Image: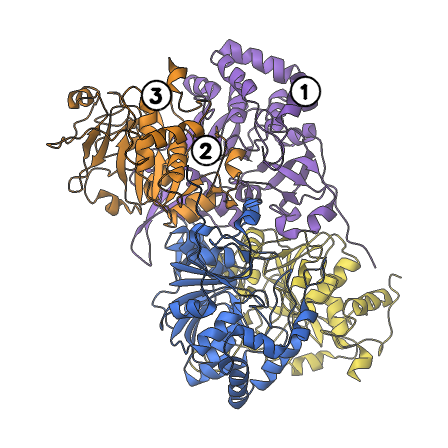
Chain colours: A purple, B orange, C blue, D yellow
């Protein structure tokens, strides 16, 4: 008798970024300050990727960096900012330059577009956007949404087109080497988004033995069947947060925000923290162990 | 402690705004909030007259009992003693669009006289001067919550005759318009600003002055508004905070992250 | 400062059954042998409820009992049987008598109809049922489903009407007294179904302190906001199973199946185990403590 | 052990059917199965030539590694060392309709020459003689899996010219019909019965004899079929089980719950 084989889907962060070709369409995971794939954002900048399209609900410093470095040219999303601080400085500038375009949806609309893609149906119904410019005005999609009359109730329903991007990128709490992923705390839109991509890359704070996952199968947020690649990426969301792992580093975020108010400031940040370092480990070294240790979650608090 | 009002000069306008917001929440209601003032107001309500209120954050935290101030709606702090931590389809879809949310609590960059809101573009859609954060869950909340409380700064360029972009639906162009558009929720019910509280006339759905804050005149409100609004014959002064409310409010945000203490602002 | 108040939503099984008026429409939880609300099925029989409509994906002995006792007159569902044993004997007879009618859907269609109801939209899109009699033939619904052409891709999509029943009934692992429910193992369609009902009754193997739930909010399957009533119902799925709690009693199920092959046999079973006993505790006493203890799950196995 | 075939008389027909089903599963494939023979066949495949196959059960158990035989697709036994335990929308919606399932493994009460299946009514829809269990997830599986394996008993009343009710779509009325109907999956690819294996002609989409089991003639198959089927010039005999396969099969179901041992049937 043969034992079930555990497939090894692990690759490095560098290899993951290499997979993503110029012009690719990505689902980009994390929500607000929670679990953004920051390490991969940095690596995409280092590898000088161009002309990506990103689909997400709401993201922050991560997509501001990708915009600043001219990696992303189009977004379909609902929200961006540096929450609690101000508008995302690089995206603002790139929009004015014409280097970045945004197609606006709502958070629910985007989450449902991912669910629709994951479900294999071409649209999902929705009761938001009705009566507003979100329906009336389109930036670059030929059909952004469609209002139909429900054949059962006669009411108006918005249909939003499903999304099946080339890659789904999510940063999770832990994963085994064949891709069974657990997410502590809120999931944002990552459960749906991770299932929408044609290829799925899961980055994780830690890689654990599959027996840990299989002892509690009802804790799995993303089963192996959906996952193509696994990347070990500790502190991969820094300076943002990961539930049960670490808090955000607001000092660093505020410094980023202040500095990026000018193009020169952004260029300086980008060189100092991204392009002049070899990889995410070097970036973390630059931040310093002491500083990171202070951010570690203090049980029983998830932050 | 009830009606043990603080004296003028003992509180800031932001504190008064938070108290106004809190008072608009009834006990037992499900309140959908973002970070900032709405969060503080909902926490205050829950710790004063509305202990059974449930606070929901769109990132997925449900019935949150946060003890520390969060900077993001996805902040792990909101997970403390929450009853559930799920995701966006849960909160915005199943809970909100599904009809379980009594009050949505939002901010606005621009609002018009029918309570329509802009949080996306300043300037034209084609060539915006400023690209604001966008709808986020704002349009979803204002589309589907049973009623909406707006908290914002009262300025002429924000209370406008015509929005630069209609992100979230108030009463659109008047009575019956929400129903005709197919919207589920009840629309805006209260606007709390640094000058006054405004509500909406049930017949015309137009915005209406409700109370003016202490020291503010109707004329002040007029001069800081870019739209016309209904002025009732009698406009009372906004009820002052009580000492109880103010003390709890200051305990909620002790470092003045969202509401600087009077001594911190001086 | 006021402490957050914990609402007490507990009622008895008898009170729960009393809430359900004749003619009511119910979402009926559990899937296959897993977590059927058997105790409530018995109580509905004892209280002689009539003319209920049940919406479910697939159910077994529980709905066969409700059919046998003339409690339910209509089903919208995808599957019923006594799995691994044979066809559900009472439903067969009641259909022949004309006392029970079934509107046929697929499991995915039913699950999506619950999701649609829960989401507050009047329909959900689907790629099943196409080309078959499931689309072509209708039993009692005026509109069972509708095929439309997708405005984005031109492909054919089936729309199935959402369901918002009067009550949703689910049997879960554990719940606190304000209705925060956890479900161990598979959820079947209970997550969606529990959110679709206008009123929601949660039955549970055990009622736990809310602090247990709140120490791991990401384990909550049904948050309090959806739940109106909570019923403590230990062994409430017997003779079926509850993951991590107890196994099925196949001896009893086989006896039921054999006996119900005739109307007389069913009447005898119904009297002996349901109508002649006062409540579920009395039913369990009849089964016997020894027998139940043998069925308790043996860790680390969930059965 | 490869090709170390057992001898005639050393195995039962049910055992041969399970082996045929198992062999149709390729290593690494995602297999969607119900309980009974399909489950046993998938478990056999995973323990012989397809250790990387992932078994999914529609109730929500994903990549199951059950060690005990389950009686229900929702049976807690299937949770043992599964990689996930979720629900129906996950398995039938996100996984299956989402395009991740390679093989669907189903039973049938009636099948026609285009592989269309009935599991709902025997007799007329208006006045059925027997009300069968219904579609369950069957229609979903056959609509969306990349290919379908059917396991069933070969009887004239089951292999029919016209179904009493079309529950699940084979090739409907022939080439192009699935595409025209809007179906996503590839349709039926193999029918394993107690007499033979049948597949489908790629051009006409009509059912075709592939192999006959040892001791069965083409004439036997004809006499037990209510429909016409394509008979190729050369019809090989079904490859016998190996000792390896048979021993593992018997270890999977040691008490003969789904496949009674030869000594148990005597």
Q: Are marks 1 and 2 on the same chain?
A: yes
Q: In 3D space, how far apart are the residues under numbered discs 1 and 2 (Cα atoms)?
A: 38 Å
What chain does badge 3 belong to? B
Q: Are marks 3 and 2 on the same chain?
A: no
Q: Does residue B233 appear left or right of residue C283 in this picture?
A: left
Q: Quadrant of the C terminus of chain C?
A: bottom right
Image position, residue B138 (x, y; %)? 37, 35
- Using the rendered view, name the quadrant where residue C208 is placed: bottom right
Please report the residue visible at 49 percent of the width from the left and 11 percent of the height from the top.
A263
Res D192 label: none
Residue C8 makes an appearance in the image:
yes
- Using the rendered view, name the quadrant where residue B114 is placed: top left
Image position, residue A108 (x, y; %)? 43, 41
Q: Can you tell which of label 1 and label 3 is closer to the viewer?
A: 1
Q: In 3D space, how far apart are the residues under numbered discs 1 and 3 (Cα atoms)?
A: 46 Å
Residue designated by label 1: A290
What kind of element bears circle 1?
A: helix
Foreground residue among A47 and B235: B235
Q: Are marks 1 and 3 on the same chain?
A: no
Res A76 label: 2
Q: In 3D space, how far apart are the residues under numbered discs 3 and 2 (Cα atoms)?
A: 18 Å
Res B127 label: 3
Question: In the rendered view, would you say C121 is above or below B161?
Answer: below
């Amino acid at each position: 008798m043969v034992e079930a084989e555990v497939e090894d889907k692990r690759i490095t962060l560098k290899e993951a970024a290499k997979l993503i070709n110029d012009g690719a369409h990505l689902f980009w995971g994390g929500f607000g300050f929670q679990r953004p794939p920051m390490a991969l954002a940095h690596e995409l900048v280092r590898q000088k990727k161009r002309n990506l399209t990103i689909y997400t609900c709401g993201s922050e410093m991560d997509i501001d960096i990708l915009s600043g470095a001219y990696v992303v040219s189009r977004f379909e999303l609902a929200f961006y900012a540096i929450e609690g601080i101000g508008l995302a400085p690089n995206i603002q500038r790139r929009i004015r330059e014409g280097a970045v375009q945004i197609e606006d949806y709502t958070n629910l609309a985007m989450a449902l577009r991912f669910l629709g893609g994951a479900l294999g149906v071409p649209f999902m119904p929705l009761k938001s956007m009705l009566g507003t410019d979100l329906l009336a005005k389109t930036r670059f999609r030929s059909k952004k949404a469609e209002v139909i009359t429900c054949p059962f109730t006669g009411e108006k329903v918005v249909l939003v087109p499903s999304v099946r991007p080339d890659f789904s990128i999510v940063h999770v709490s832990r994963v085994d080497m064949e891709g069974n992923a657990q997410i502590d705390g809120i999931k944002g839109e990552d459960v749906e988004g991770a299932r929408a991509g044609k290829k799925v890359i899961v980055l994780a704070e830690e890689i654990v033995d599959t027996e840990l996952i299989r002892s509690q199968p009802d804790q799995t947020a993303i089963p192996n069947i959906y996952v193509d690649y696994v990347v070990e990426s500790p502190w991969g969301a820094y300076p943002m947060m990961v539930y049960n792992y670490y808090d955000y580093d607001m000092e660093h975020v505020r410094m980023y925000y202040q500095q990026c108010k000018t193009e020169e400031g952004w260029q300086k940040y980008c060189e100092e923290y991204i392009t002049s370092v070899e990889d995410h480990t070097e970036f973390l070294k630059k931040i310093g162990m002491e500083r990171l240790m202070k951010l570690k979650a203090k049980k029983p608090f998830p932050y | 402690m009830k009606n043990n009002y603080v004296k003028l000069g003992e509180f800031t306008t932001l504190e008064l705004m938070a108290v106004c917001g809190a008072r608009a929440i009834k006990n037992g209601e499900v309140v959908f909030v973002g970070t900032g003032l709405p969060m503080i107001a909902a926490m205050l309500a829950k710790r004063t007259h509305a202990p059974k209120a449930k606070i929901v954050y769109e990132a997925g935290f449900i019935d949150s009992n946060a003890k520390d101030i969060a900077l993001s709606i996805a902040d792990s702090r909101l997970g403390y003693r929450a009853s559930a931590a799920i995701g966006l389809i849960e909160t915005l879809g199943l809970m909100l669009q599904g009809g379980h949310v009594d009050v949505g609590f939002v901010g606005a960059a621009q609002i018009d006289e029918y309570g329509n809101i802009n949080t996306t573009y300043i300037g034209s859609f084609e060539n915006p001067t400023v690209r604001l954060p966008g709808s986020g869950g704002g349009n979803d909340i204002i589309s589907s919550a049973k009623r909406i409380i707006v908290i914002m700064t009262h300025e002429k360029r924000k209370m406008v005759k015509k929005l630069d972009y209609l992100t979230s639906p108030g009463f659109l162009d008047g009575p019956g318009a929400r129903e005709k558009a197919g919207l589920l929720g009840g629309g805006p019910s209260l606007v709390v600003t640094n000058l006054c509280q405004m509500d909406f006339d049930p017949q015309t759905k137009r915005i209406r002055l409700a109370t003016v804050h202490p020291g503010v005149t109707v004329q002040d409100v007029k001069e800081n508004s870019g739209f016309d609004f209904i002025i009732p014959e009698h406009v009372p002064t906004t009820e002052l905070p009580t000492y109880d409310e103010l003390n709890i409010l200051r305990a909620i945000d002790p470092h003045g992250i969202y509401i600087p203490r009077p001594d911190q602002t001086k």
